Amino acid sequence: MEPSPSDPPAPAPTEDPAPSEEEEAEAAPSSALSLEEIQRVWPAILQKLHEAKGAHAATFDAAQPVGYDEEGLRIGFGADQAFAKRQAEARREVLVEAVEAVTGQKVRPIFVLLDGEAPPDTPAPGSDQIDEEELLERLKSEFDAEEVG
């Protein structure tokens, strides 16, 4: 049967409908961040940590992002910073919140000790002796303490 002139024309074949935002989010990689981007905003992440949890922030001051892949964000600590690494593991959620506040993305931090190499901009172990005043400031910061006299 042939279509009559009064029948509406058959719809033209269409492409698949555009994917919804949810479908695009599922199809997109889990993170648009790169290691380079995280390294670029690392100072802002540290600043956010200091604003939110000053006493906890000192834990991450000597750390640096050293890797980022589907497993998570690797945060490197110098070989002599095992204590800071343990503190970071206990304070993981504080870092997750700071990264999300700065980048808009949640990450899974993985804390690692760097074998014999210091993160960039960190003095090599033993190259600079920490003076007493710096030690006191660090202890006060890390333990949210104040000096009594």
Image: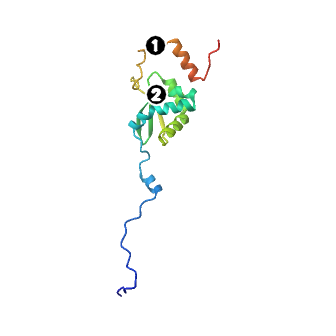
Figure label count: 2
Q: Is residue 92 visible?
A: yes
Task: Specify the quadrant of the image occupied by residue 148.
Answer: top right
Side (left or right) of 12 relative to 74: left
**Residue 49 location in percent, x, y?**
53, 31
Q: Is residue 111 visible?
A: no
Q: Is residue 96 above or below residue 142?
A: below
Colour scheme of the rendered structure: rainbow
**Residue 87 location in percent, x, y?**
54, 28
Q: Nearer the viewer, residue 83 or 8?
A: 8
Of helix, strand and loop, which one carries label 2? loop
Task: Specify the quadrant of the image occupied by residue 66.
Answer: top left
Task: Specify the quadrant of the image occupied by residue 141.
Answer: top right
Q: Which residue is mark 2?
A: 63
Q: Residue at x 59, y 23 (%)?
A: 143
Q: Which residue is mark 1?
A: 129
In the displayed image of the protein, which residue is found farthest to the left? 2
Kind of residue at disc 1: Gln
Side (left or right) of 49 relative to 67: right
**Residue 108 location in percent, x, y?**
48, 39
Quadrant that contains the C terminus: top right
Side (left or right) of 142 relative to 77: right
Q: Residue at x 49, y 30 (%)?
A: 46
Q: Nearer the viewer, residue 75 or 4?
A: 4
Label 1 Cα crowd, 10 Å radius (few <14 / some 14-19 / many 20+): few
Kind of residue at disc 2: Ala
Of helix, strand and loop, which one carries label 1? loop
Q: Earlier in the sequence, mark 2 or mark 1?
A: 2
